Image: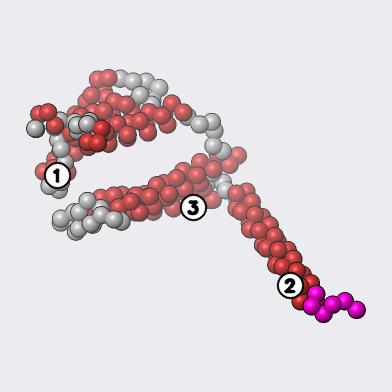
Amino acid sequence: MGNPRDIPRVSQIGGIHILKVHKYKAECELLEIFRRSLVNIKSQKDFYSGLMFTLLGLVFVYGASSYNLGTAARMGPGYFPTLLGTILTILGGMITITGFTSKAKDGDKIGKWAWKPLFFIISSNLLFGLLLGGLPKLGIPYMGMVAAIFGLVIVASLAGEVFKLKEVLILSVVLSIGSYLAFVLLLKLQLPVWPAFITG
């Protein structure tokens, strides 16, 4: 007969082996469920774009959670990002659901990455933030809301196939006037409108 002290060790090893087997089966079942859910996606474009909107909205809400919300009458710095993030999250969830109910043919698969529009859209947003707030640590002054909107619209317009300067400038003027009326006059937000070298 073997040493009785070895019996608990064998039992323990057997128990660990059984747990590993059950864990492996559970992982396989989860992978199978995930694979079937992907098969049921009727429109990949709607599904993944909805996920992107949802994640982006959650990032906005999380980033704004450290700021004061304020009220609808007196908005704090975290009010608008939280509102925007909530809307994006709800919109993303709705678009994701349509990915399972869409009647698109051949699954409406995602094509090749459009690197040019992606580059100019991201660059326009980065430029907007740089022109609006500047980079004080690097000695770069702010240029104000008007310049930021012009930079945003001009660079974002380069993402399209056709660039018409006249239409872009008209759109920039309209957006600048509308933003000034909405955010500065009506909402009383403390935004720099003109460059630092003008306002001092």
Q: Is residue 86 above or below residue 196?
A: below
- Quadrant position of residue 15: bottom right
Earlier residue among tags 2 and 3: 2
How far from the left and from the top, in percent, is residue 98? 49, 49
**Amino acid carrying mark 1 in the image:** Gln
Q: Compared with residue 10, is residue 20 higher up or lower down, i.e. above or below?
A: above
Report the residue marked by disc 2. Answer: 12
Instruction: Give how far apart the Cα atoms at labels 3 and 1 are.
Output: 39 Å
Q: What kind of colouring is applied to the model shown?
A: secondary structure
Q: Nearer the viewer, residue 131 or 176?
A: 131
**What main secondary structure does the magenta stretch of the protein show?**
loop
Mark 1, Cα crowd under 10 Å, few <14 / some 14-19 / many 20+, is few
State the count of labels: 3
Q: Which residue is mark 3?
A: 97
Vertical order, 62 against 152 (above or below): below
Decide if residue 101 is in sight here: yes
Residue type highlighted by circle 2: Gln
Q: Name the disc covering residue 178, or none.
A: none
Q: Nearer the viewer, mark 2 or mark 3?
A: 2
User: Which type of secondary structure does the marked residue at label 2 adopt?
Assistant: helix
Residue 179, compared with residue 157, is above or below; it is below
Q: Is residue 94 left or right of residue 142?
A: right
> Which of pointers 2 and 1 lies earlier in the amino acid sequence?
2
In the image, which is nearer the foreground, mark 2 or mark 1?
A: 2
- Name the residue beneath numbered marker 1: 190
- Residue 92 in sight here: no
Is label 3 or label 1 in front?
1
Q: Quadrant of the N terminus?
A: bottom right
Mark-to-mark CA distance, 2 and 1: 67 Å
Q: Position of residue 73 (x, y in %)?
A: 15, 56
User: The C terminus lies in which quarter of the figure?
Assistant: top left
